[in-house]
Image (tube, grey):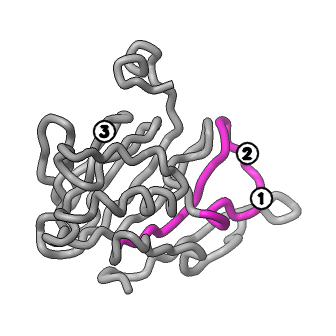
Amino acid sequence: MSAFPSITRIVTGHAPDGRSVIWEQGSLPTVVEIAAIPGTLFHEVWATSGAPAPVDNGPDPSLGPLSLPPPPGGTRIRFVDIPPDTEEFLRNGASRMEDAFDQIGDKAASTVKGDSPHPLMHRTESIDYGIVIEGEMTLVLDEGEVLLKPGSVVVQRGTNHAWANRSGKPCRMLFVLVAGSYDPELAAKLAIR
């Protein structure tokens, strides 16, 4: 159960004559708790599968299996409710990350190692806009970290990172992910193929 209000999604569309209409209005159809990280909820809002994105009355792209990264050439928007880190999670969470990232469709995203600064260290080949809606979050990088408060916006450019909730209260963030492609020189340094 989320500590935050439910999210209402309004999807517009076109009537047969081309006039604009409310196509759908209501709760999000896909809200998933990450089993390996109890209390972490992914609220899937929408996704596009390429650019330019088709403007049509097509099917709801938020249905189906959960996937962390956006589709190739596409975008993804979601809210994520993140519970406070616990001592048990910080001590043993790294051993559950393979399962956690497998559940969100990107097992390879986890980069956690024995000396990682946080058990949720991961990387995706995307540009992510992370906005704190409510609560506090700490962005953890290989070198450095920063405390985020409501209204803070992170432009995360495919870097190795984690979201650490040290506040003692749940945090809700909004993420917009845009598919990317590593610069070949950077990819070589990161040992990405």
- Report the residue marked by disc 2: 54
Query: 10 Å neighbourhood of mark 1: few (<14), some, or many (≥20)?
Result: few
Query: 10 Å neighbourhood of mark 3: few (<14), some, or many (≥20)?
Result: many
Residue 95 x %, y %: 32, 60
- C-alpha span from label 1 to label 3: 34 Å
Image height check: is 183 above or below 96? above
Q: The residue under label 2 is which amino acid type?
A: Pro
Q: The residue under label 3 is which amino acid type?
A: Asn
Residue 167 relative to residue 34: left or right: left
Residue occupying the point 23% across, 65% down: 92
Residue occupying the point 27% across, 45% down: 113
- C-alpha span from label 2 to label 1: 8 Å
Whether residue 46 appears in magenta in the rendering, the answer is yes
Residue occupying the point 65% across, 36% down: 51
Mark number for residue 58? 1
Q: Main secondary structure of the magenta part?
A: loop
Which contiguous range is marked in magenta?
A: 40-65
- The answer to the question of whether label 2 and label 1 lie on touching residues, with beta carbons closer than 8 A, is yes
